[in-house]
Image (cartoon, rainbow, N blue to C red):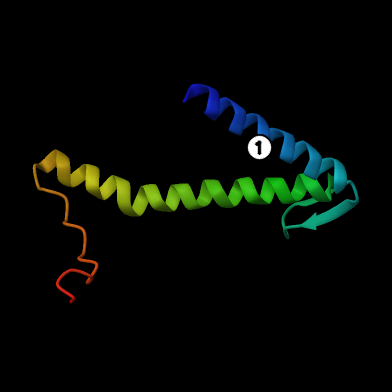
Amino acid sequence: MRLIKAILALLFVAFGVLFGALNRDPVRIDLGFLSVDTLSLGTSLLLALLAGALLAGFVLTATVIWPLRHRLRRGQPAPAAPATGTEGHD
């Protein structure tokens, strides 16, 4: 299992390097309070993807994981998963 994870990690790194190498055109990013002129298109897209993943992880942590941990600390059970609605059909 560890080998599979290492191979997948290497594939993603290789994909990122290839993506960055194929998209070397310079872009200007203006955020209003900050302007960046020295990034390539591939680098800026990969950084935007990373920022989105980190933001999504933080939102998931703040809205799901922290409330469930708080409930478990207080001794309350976690809410049951909703029924799929496929049981009982002929």
The residue positioned 73% from the left and 40% from the top of the image is 16
Residue 86: % across, % down: 23, 70
Determine the residue located farthest toward the bottom in the rendered image.
90
Note whether 24 is above or below 14 in the view shown.
below
The image shows a total of numbered marks equal to 1
Note whether 83 is above or below 44 in the view shown.
below
Determine the residue located farthest toward the left in the rendered image.
75
Q: Which residue is mark 1?
A: 12
Q: Which residue occupies the foreground of this view, 41 or 13?
A: 13
Residue 36: % across, % down: 81, 49
Give the residue type at disc 1: Phe
The residue positioned 73% from the left and 60% from the top of the image is 32
Q: Which residue occupies the foreground of this view, 7 or 42?
A: 7
Q: Is residue 55 left or right of residue 22?
A: left
Determine the residue located farthest toward the top in the rendered image.
3
Q: Which residue occupies the foreground of this view, 65 or 13?
A: 13
Note whether 1 is above or below 77 in the view shown.
above
The residue positioned 11% from the left and 48% from the top of the image is 77
Residue 24: % across, % down: 89, 46
Q: Is residue 73 left or right of residue 45?
A: left
Identify the element where label 1 is drawn: helix
Residue 60: % across, % down: 40, 51
The residue positioned 16% from the left and 50% from the top of the image is 78
